């Protein structure tokens, strides 16, 4: 939340993890920008994972997931993310700012 505040995102539009996770099943598209461990399903699905039990955003329950990252590299915890390889996930690799700007210019 600190990073969002620094980016000028109003706090009243930010939802807590517990509030948003229930909504993903009814979500058409989730756009994940530069996250890895915080959307890693191994935290829930793999009891032997070093991140088992860590709270995560359960984005993989959405109909479609688009993950924007510079590369397929592992996150801070050093754990591969199974969400990257799920049927409903597409990876959009590259600089997130440039990619967001390009996407935004197509929508405007």
Image (cartoon, rainbow, N blue to C red):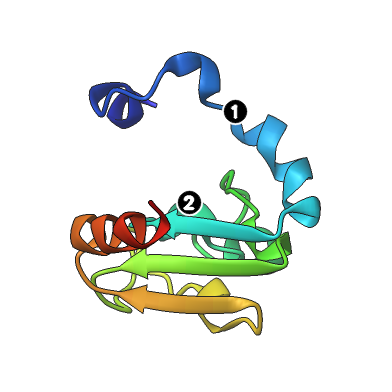
**14 relative to 74, above or below:** above
Disc 2, SS: helix
Where residue 43 is drawn, which disc sits there? Answer: none
Residue 48 appearing in the image: no
The image quadrant of residue 68 is bottom left
Q: Which residue is at the front of the view, 99 or 105?
A: 105
The percent position of residue 84, horizontal first and vertical second, equals 50, 77
Q: Are marks 1 and 2 in contact (CB under 8 Å)?
A: no
- The residue indicated by pointer 2 is 38
The image quadrant of residue 62 is bottom right
Q: Which residue is at the front of the view, 65 or 17?
A: 65
The percent position of residue 41, horizontal first and vertical second, equals 61, 64
- The residue indicated by pointer 1 is 16
Q: Which residue is at the front of the view, 49 or 81?
A: 81
The image quadrant of residue 70 is bottom left
Query: Mark 1 packing: few (<14 Cα in 10 Å), some, or many (20+)?
Result: few
Q: Residue at x 52, y 26 (%)?
A: 14
């Amino acid at each position: 939340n600190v990073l969002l505040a620094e980016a000028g995102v109003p706090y009243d539009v930010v939802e807590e993890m517990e509030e948003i996770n229930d909504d993903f099943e009814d979500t058409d598209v989730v756009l994940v920008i530069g996250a890895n461990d915080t959307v890693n399903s191994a935290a829930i699905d793999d009891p032997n994972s070093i991140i088992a039990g860590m709270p995560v955003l359960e984005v993989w329950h959405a109909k479609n997931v688009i993950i924007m990252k510079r590369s397929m590299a592992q996150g801070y915890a050093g754990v591969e993310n199974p969400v990257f390889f799920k049927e409903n996930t597409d990876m959009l690799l590259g600089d997130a700012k440039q990619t967001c700007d390009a996407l935004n210019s197509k929508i405007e």
